[in-house]
Image (tube, grey):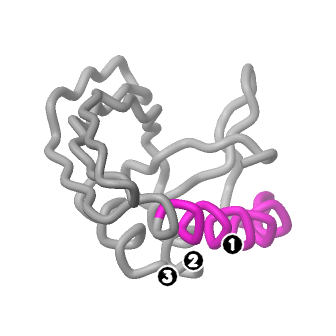
Amino acid sequence: MRELRQVQESGDAHRACEDVYVIRERGRPVESEEEDSGERAGCEPAFEQAVRQRRAGLKRLDTRLAKVTLRDEEGVAVLHTAATRADGSTFERDVPYEIVRTDEGWRVAISPEG
């Protein structure tokens, strides 16, 4: 989850899609690196758009790992998020991330649609 926050802060879409995220369709196993290379190409523009939106909407974003629940090769990591919006208002919430074990290590699962 530390890498997730690092790539979100840096905006490094290539690293995010290579080292942090993994494409996973609901009800299907995670695809291998060879099978998902075409899908990963769609990851970078979606990631870049999300970074632009976050940067435009937030002045400050702090996170801490609140909880991790694992079950075999899958799990959920919950990040407690505290933020200040561009208008000065604040919010806090727990954000769950589906995680899966891959041959390359634990990754944050995303659908092909982003």
Label 1 neighbour load within 10 Å: few <14, some 14-19, many 20+? many
Where residue 72 appears, x then y in whole percent? 37, 21
Label 1 close to label 2 by CB (< 8 Å): yes
Picture quadrant of residue 64: top left
Label 2, secondary structure: give it. helix
The amino acid type found where label 2 is placed reads Ala
In the figure, 27 relative to 64: above or below?
above
Q: Which residue is mark 1?
A: 44
Label 3 close to label 2 by CB (< 8 Å): yes
In the figure, 28 relative to 100: above or below?
above
Q: Is residue 111 left or right of residue 94?
A: right
Task: Identify which residue, 114 or 18, lies in the foreground.
Answer: 114
Instruction: Provide the residue span drawn in magenta.
Output: 34-54
User: Mark on residue 13?
Assistant: 2
Task: Identify which residue, 55 or 86, lies in the foreground.
Answer: 86
Where residue 66 appears, x then y in whole percent? 15, 31
Label 3, secondary structure: give it. loop
Q: Which residue is mark 3?
A: 12
Where residue 62 appears, x then y in whole percent? 19, 54
Q: CA distance from mark 1 to mark 3?
A: 9 Å
Task: Identify which residue, 93 or 7, lies in the foreground.
Answer: 93
Report if residue 64 lies within the magenta region.
no
Q: Is residue 105 left or right of residue 50?
A: left
Q: Residue at x 23, y 60 (%)?
A: 2
In the figure, 12 relative to 91: above or below?
below
Q: CA distance from mark 1 to mark 2?
A: 5 Å
Magenta segment, prevailing SS (helix, strand or loop): helix
Q: Residue furthest front?
A: 87
Q: Is residue 100 left or right of residue 5?
A: right
Q: CA distance from mark 3 to mark 2?
A: 4 Å
Label 1, secondary structure: give it. helix
Report if residue 42 lies within the magenta region.
yes
